[in-house]
Image: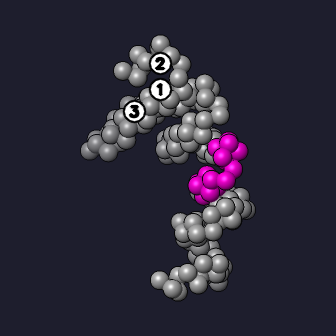
């Protein structure tokens, strides 16, 4: 039905809903015992097309950029090059539209780590924590980043700003 609705009205929300539906089809196919890779690629391509259109018709709606980033994140295993660049671009746009939302910076850190950009990841983690000093997920992931790099003192030091709160619990 959303496909018909889009034909009548270029509402970005309709494109976003259609993108979610294609993303769900992608997921459903991928968890089958014998997934059809071609179907996965087609569904993912259609999800991407719909998400791009939602940003085209709703440039200032944060939900559209978030959906686009989600689809690019999901396409990284399938698309060999460029998907992570689009993840970063989409999340940067989302953070421009809603600069006080730490979630986008936390996700940016993940995207930077995916391409082994440790400087970008650290900066994004710090920004997420600056925006939301009790954002435990950002602290945990930032600490894990240091632990993976065998910088254990830094991994512990990440928690220093909230150490008092942790001790009380």
What residue is rendered at 65% in x and 34% in y? 60
Asked whether 105 falls inside the magenta stretch, the response is yes
Query: Is there CB contact under 8 Å for labels 1 and 2?
Result: yes
Q: Quadrant of residue 85?
A: top right
What residue is rendered at 60% in x and 35% in y? 61
What's drawn in magenta, residue-wise? 93-108
Of the residues tagged 2 and 3, which is closer to the observer? Answer: 2
* Mark 3 lies on residue: 21
Query: Is there CB contact under 8 Å for labels 1 and 3?
Result: no
Give how far across and how far down residue 4 sits, in percent: 41, 16
Give whichever of discs 2 and 3 has the lower sequence position: 2
How many neighbours does mark 1 have within 10 angstroms: few (below 14), some (14-19), or many (20 or more)?
many
Give whichever of discs 1 and 3 has the lower sequence position: 1
Left or right of 96, for residue 47: left
Give how far across and how far down residue 41 sits, in percent: 44, 33
Q: Give the farthest residue toward the bottom.
A: 167
Whether residue 12 appears in this view of the structure is yes
Q: Secondary structure at mark 3?
A: helix
């Amino acid at each position: 039905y959303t496909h018909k609705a889009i034909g009548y009205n270029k509402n970005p929300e309709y494109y976003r809903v259609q993108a979610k539906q294609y993303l769900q089809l992608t997921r459903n196919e991928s968890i089958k015992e014998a997934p059809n890779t071609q179907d996965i690629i087609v569904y993912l391509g259609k999800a991407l097309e719909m998400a791009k259109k939602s940003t085209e018709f709703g440039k200032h709606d944060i939900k559209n950029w978030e959906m686009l980033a989600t689809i690019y994140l999901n396409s990284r295993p399938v698309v060999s090059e460029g998907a992570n660049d689009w993840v970063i671009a989409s999340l940067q746009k989302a953070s421009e539209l809603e600069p006080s939302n730490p979630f986008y910076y936390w996700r940016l850190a993940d995207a930077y780590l995916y391409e082994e950009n440790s400087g970008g990841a650290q900066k994004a983690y710090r920004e997420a924590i600056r925006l939301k000093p009790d954002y435990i997920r950002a602290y945990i992931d930032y600490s894990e980043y240091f632990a993976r790099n065998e910088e254990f003192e830094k991994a512990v030091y990440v928690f220093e700003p909230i150490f008092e709160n942790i001790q009380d619990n």
